[in-house]
Image (cartoon, helix red, strand yellow):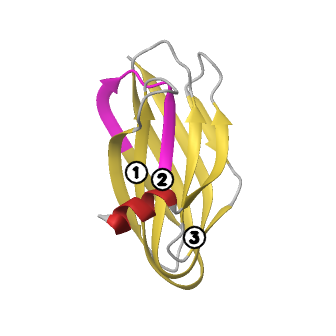
Amino acid sequence: MVFGMLAMFANAQLATINVEPGKTTAVVNSTYVLTNTTAGYMVYNAAQVWTTTQDFTVTFHKASGTPTRVNVVLYGQKTPDTPWVSIVTGFWKVTSADTVMTLSNTTANRYVNYKVLFTPSGTGVSNITKQYLKLYFQ
């Protein structure tokens, strides 16, 4: 239990991305580094007035060492004052090649903010080289 609480606080925000009102995509081409077991997350502010489903696509690259996997969780938030709710999860098993992974949620919801939490394991460095959040208006 204590370890789980530490894991929640032992992560760093990588960036905040704003999705323009009425727009359906956010593309991030910047590289972000995940080291050893230090989690990092991205926040997407997408104050939409429509119910949406979501796809989140990310490209990973093994940089060095022996990272073994990266768990990825897409969260949603109804307002800035409400808790984050897990929408969909997945993981990347580290290989030597770039890997593209997509998390898809087909259940319509009304979130205005999204957070993607990346939790690596192993000892080494992995890079996030591209991210793509797609909102499908319902």
Real-space Cα separation, disc 3 to disc 2, in angstroms? 17 Å
Q: Are marks 3 and 2 in contact (CB under 8 Å)?
A: no
The residue at 69%/60% (across/down) is: 31
* Image position, residue 32 (x, y; %): 66, 61
The residue at 63%/41% (across/down) is: 27
Report which residue position mark 2 lands on. Answer: 117
Report which residue position mark 3 lands on. Answer: 61
Mark 1 belongs to which amino acid? Answer: Val
* Sequence-first tag of 3 and 2: 3
* Image position, residue 100 (x, y; %): 49, 59
Mark 3 belongs to which amino acid? Answer: His
The residue at 41%/41% (across/down) is: 75
Where 5 falls versus 83 (above or below)? Answer: below
What secondary structure do most residues of the magenta stretch adopt? strand
Q: Is residue 110 magenta?
A: yes
Report which residue position mark 1 lands on. Answer: 73
Mark 2 belongs to which amino acid? Answer: Leu
Real-space Cα separation, disc 3 to disc 1, in angstroms? 18 Å
Q: Quadrant of residue 43?
A: top right
* Sequence-first tag of 2 and 1: 1
Q: Is residue 71 visible?
A: no
Real-space Cα separation, disc 2 to disc 1, in angstroms? 5 Å
Location of the C terminus by quadrant is top left
Residue 69 or residue 138, whichever sits in front: 69
Label 3, secondary structure: give it: strand
Location of the N terminus by quadrant is bottom left
Residue range of the region highlighted in magenta in the rendering: 104-117
Where 67 falls versus 83 (above or below)? Answer: below
Q: Are marks 2 and 1 in contact (CB under 8 Å)?
A: yes
